[in-house]
Amino acid sequence: MPEKPMHAQLQERLSAFLGENTARVAVSTFAKKAVNKTPEELTRDDIPAVLDALGPMLRTLLGEASAKSLLESIGKEVLG
């Protein structure tokens, strides 16, 4: 079975915390902001920058500890 695209993996993990639509918009917004790419253009090498860019928003919405845990978990899952 083929691996899901990077943006789909990010959206899937974020949607549990942000909802499906907000997760989709967040990945799109922060992909553009962090690496100037569309979500579909994201590569494995782009993920750390996108996760860093998502950090402030997630800290505001989830709190410091939860955001840090989520970002670390996503990083491990998506990047292996």
Image (cartoon, grey):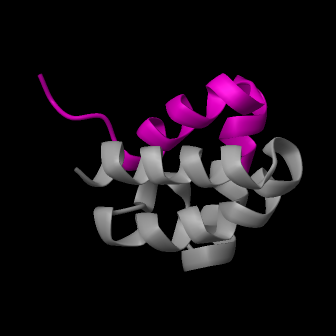
In the rendered image, the residue lying farthest to the front is 65
Number of marks: 0
From the viewer's perspective, is 17 left or right of 8?
A: right
Tell me: residue 4, above or below residue 55. above
Magenta part, dominant SS: helix
The residue that appears at 42% across and 61% down in the rendered structure is: 42
Taking the magenta stretch, the answer to whether it contains residue 21 is: yes
The residue that appears at 30% across and 62% down in the rendered structure is: 44
Q: Quadrant of residue 16?
A: top right
Taking the magenta stretch, the answer to whether it contains residue 4 is: yes
Q: Where's residue 31, x and y in %? A: 59, 64
The residue that appears at 75% across and 32% down in the rendered structure is: 18
In the rendered image, the residue lying farthest to the right is 60
The residue that appears at 76% across and 55% down in the rendered structure is: 64
Q: State the residue in front, 75 or 8.
A: 75
Q: Where's residue 63, x and y in %? A: 81, 48
Q: State the residue in front, 16 or 9.
A: 16
In the rendered image, the residue lying farthest to the left is 1
From the viewer's perspective, is 69 left or right of 5?
A: right
Tell me: residue 56, above or below residue 76. below
Q: Residues in magenta?
A: 1-26
Tell me: residue 74, above or below residue 36. above
From the viewer's perspective, is 70 left or right of 64?
A: left
Q: Where's residue 51, x and y in %? A: 55, 62
Quadrant of the rendering where the N terminus is positioned: top left
Q: Where's residue 35, x and y in %? A: 54, 77
